[in-house]
Image: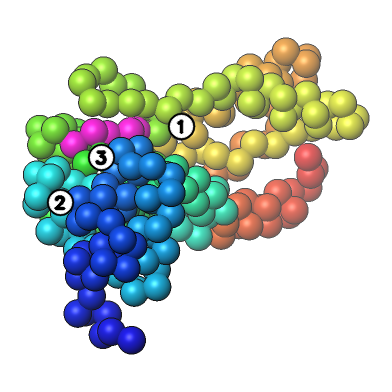
Amino acid sequence: GKDVMAVTIHDVARLAGTSIATVSQGLNSPRRVSAEARRRVLAAAKKLKYYPNLHARNLARRKSCTLGIIVSDIQNPFFPAVIRSFEARASRWGYDVIVSDTNYKPRLMTRATERMIEQNVRGVAIMTSEMSSTLFRELVGRKIAVTLLDVDSAAANITTIKFDYSSGLYQAVEHLYGLGHRRIAFVGGQSLKSIKARQTAYLESIRKFGLEPGPIISGNQSVEGGLAAGLIIARLSERP
């Protein structure tokens, strides 16, 4: 076989029995070609191990085919599921994905934002609580579409995913109450807006069931933070 680096779009077109334009559309704009033509193009590209030059493709289009996602902690079981879903949907629309992890550090959030700008992303999903207004304005000023996680915002090209903490916490307390539990603790106690919102929802839910609030334990959002909080609860003289 051919050396992978030597394979060109001309080779793919020759093997697929199509024009170069059809190969380009089959790989980048599938809706513009027939299903049979796309099948032949993909089969030829796979056989020849052809990988399109994404940088050249983006320059030709004068817009990026890359999306970014920034998460707080890649080891948190919540985020891998989010990233998998994000990548699957992006792939369906022909986008590549860059992932950055801030580990809850503002300094790394700055670096992640810079990386997204350097890579000329078309849009970025920011699934963290470390976003500063300066970084946010930098992205918006460059007309990069932004999706935020539970942050109040109103501007063009910005989407916010909001959480219904009241309903979620009420269901959690209701579940424990239904199992016969009457002393229910809450792990949070941080200054983050999202933690405060959950704590408020917890207290409201507890009162709706006529209960007294249980211990409120401070702990960060990592797995280690949850373990540490659990050990504190286990050592209480009156455990919830």
Magenta residues, start to end? 144-148
Q: Are marks 3 and 2 in contact (CB under 8 Å)?
A: no
Within-10-Å neighbours for mark 1: few <14, some 14–19, many 20+: some
Q: Horizontal placement of 183 versus 21: left or right? A: right
- Which structural element holds mark 1? helix
Distance between mark 3 and mark 2 Cα atoms: 14 Å
- Which structural element holds mark 3? strand
Q: Amino acid at mark 2?
A: Asn
193 or 61, nearer to the observer = 61
Distance between mark 2 and mark 1 Cα atoms: 37 Å
Q: Earlier in the sequence, mark 2 or mark 1?
A: 2
Q: Position of residue 31 (x, y in %)?
A: 35, 38
Residue matched to label 1: 194
Within-10-Å neighbours for mark 3: few <14, some 14–19, many 20+: many
Q: Are marks 1 and 3 in contact (CB under 8 Å)?
A: no
Residue matched to label 3: 123
- Which structural element holds mark 2? helix
Q: Which mark is residue 62?
A: none
Task: Give the quadrant of residue 122.
Answer: top left
Q: Would you say the magenta stretch is mainly helix, strand or loop?
A: strand
Q: Examine the rendering and report whether any part of residue 165 can be seen.
A: yes
Q: Amino acid at mark 1?
A: Ser
Within-10-Å neighbours for mark 2: few <14, some 14–19, many 20+: some
Q: Which mark is residue 58?
A: 2
The residue drawn where x is 34% and y is 74% is 48
